[in-house]
Amino acid sequence: MKIVHTLLISIFISTAVFGQGQKPQDFLSSDFHKERREILRNKMPGNSVAVFFSNPIRNRANDVNFKYHQDPNFYYLTGHRQPHGLLMIFSEEQNINGKVMNEIIFVRGRNALAELYDGGRISTAEAVNDLKLEVAFETPDFESFPIDFSKFYQVLFYDFENDVRETQEEGDLYDLISQFKKKVNYPDDSNLDITPEPQENNLNTTLLDELLRPMRGIKTKEELDLLRKAVKISALGQAEVMRAMKPGMSELEVQGMHEFIYKKYKAEYEGYPSIVGAGHNGCVLHYIDNYKPEIEDGELILMDLGAEYHGYTADVTRTIPVNGKFTKEQKAIYDLVYEAQEAGMSVAKAGVPFSAVFDTTLAVINKGLLELGIVKSLNEEDLIDPATGRHRYYPHGCCHHIGLDVHDLGEYGTLEENMVITIEPGIYIPEGSPCDEKWWDIPVRIEDDYLIKKDGIELLSDDAPRKSSEIEELMQEESAFGQFNLPDIEEK
Ligand code: GLY
Ligand code: MN
Ligand code: MN
């Protein structure tokens, strides 16, 4: 039995009690989300229904959860940021119980006790008035909602990851998924990627991604405004940290300075766990421990971070000399990565394949590695690390979409106007690499965010210098963090 707090149900803490000034006013508009639903509806096959579930709440430990983050597709289509929700979009209007609708949202039922702890839940009236959904019900009503999924030609949804907890609250995500599975005769032994043979069943777990990918990959004006802001905040963070950087700081302190700046500019999250690696830690591509207690004089530090502003995330990397001056070897590698990025930038524009940008950066890096004597030849045995099967020193791709996800949904064939992508070449030379040890522990990634235009690109992250000489120059400036002194708490 679910615990329903009926006695307290009338004591609602409505979101309405929080005045306008209590929330930012520059979120995507409800018209944006409504238009997205309309576009998706028009792309759906006739007589189909698309079903979306909100993200699960992730447990951190015991009774404490991670801060909630909505599923990007659910957010894109609704603007709803609370957990335990279900959205249905119908390709044609449905008449259900005498009510005509082409979409319906189920939002979590009100619960005064839970709202006392977690804040107000959106009401069904607010879902209709503020989110502009046609019809809204509370999630406990889904079980008895009279919908016959068998009559649709296709039921479109993303397959389930089996990572949803039963919270013992009526109409939670666990219930919604269980009830949905029952209603659609979801096969027990289902593997991911159900693409139905028409005679077998009408469930399709692959088409939604195909329909949403081109939509999510091309940014609208409203999305661009938020992305520009996220990128600007992240680049300003990089620039300020360049001013503040000193040997002896810890990696966590450096991470904290970036993230403080994000919060100062009211960015709610980091778009992904912040990567701050000094010396050989920078050679671990997604190093997020950020544990090194004292960054050493003479090291490079690689900082790959992105502010998330109202759902949209930047992805910006700078690699800088901790003491403000690149050594000869560090500068040689840095300038080679810079040259590769510039070359990638020079070919990127609408109509060019993504692969052309990567190939351009790779050609510059390979040529440079050969000239510096870091690789003996451009033959496979010299370039490819047999342990990983990847390029020994440039082991990753160079471009991806950013948006509601840091590796955003989008097409990866040809660049198109209003895509926003990264160009992020890198060279990483871990200790023990088969080259002169003067190159060891030099990691460099330079990553910027770009708007694709008809005739070229717009660099969005230009508030953080990229050129080695400009970085060295900025690192001479004073930082506001220089005045930020706290008492020493180490035992002497
Ligand atoms: N921050 C992850 C990436 O650059 O793709
Ligand atoms: Mn990236
Ligand atoms: Mn990155």
Image (cartoon, grey):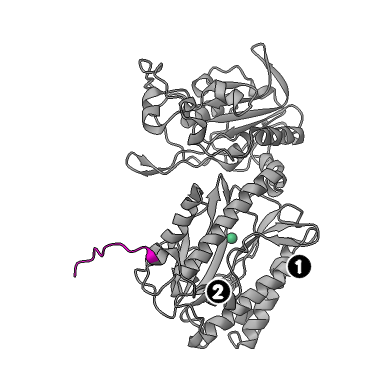
Depth check, mark 2 against mark 1: the one in front is: 2
Residue drawn at 19 percent across, 70 percent down: 492
Real-space Cα distance between discs 2 and 1?
Answer: 25 Å
Q: Tell me which label, 2 or 1, sits earlier in the chain.
A: 1
Say whether residue 29 is left or right of residue 251.
right
| Vertical position of residue 249 compared to residue 257: above or below | below
Name the spot of residue 84 as percent of width and height, x first. 49, 31
- SS label for mark 2: helix
Amino acid marked by disc 1: Val
Corner quadrant of residue 365: bottom right
Foreground of the two, 386 or 77: 77
Q: Which mark is residue 347?
A: 1
Residue drawn at 49 percent across, 87 percent down: 438
Say whether residue 16 is left or right of residue 191.
left
User: Label 1 neighbourhood size at 10 Å, few (<14), some (14-19), many (20+)?
Assistant: some
Say whether residue 363 is left or right of residue 387.
right
Say whether residue 218 is left or right of residue 114.
right
Name the spot of residue 293 as percent of width and height, x first. 34, 68
Q: Which mark is residue 435?
A: none
Residue drawn at 64 percent across, 12 percent down: 97
Foreground of the two, 181 or 13: 13
Corner quadrant of residue 378: bottom right
Residue under numbered circle 2: 471
Segment colored magenta: 483-492
Foreground of the two, 276 or 466: 466
Name the spot of residue 248 as percent of width and height, x first. 36, 73
| Vertical position of residue 435 compared to residue 210: above or below | below
- SS label for mark 1: helix
Q: Main secondary structure of the magenta part?
A: loop
Amino acid marked by disc 2: Ile
User: Label 2 neighbourhood size at 10 Å, few (<14), some (14-19), many (20+)?
Assistant: many
Name the spot of residue 346 as percent of width and height, x first. 74, 69
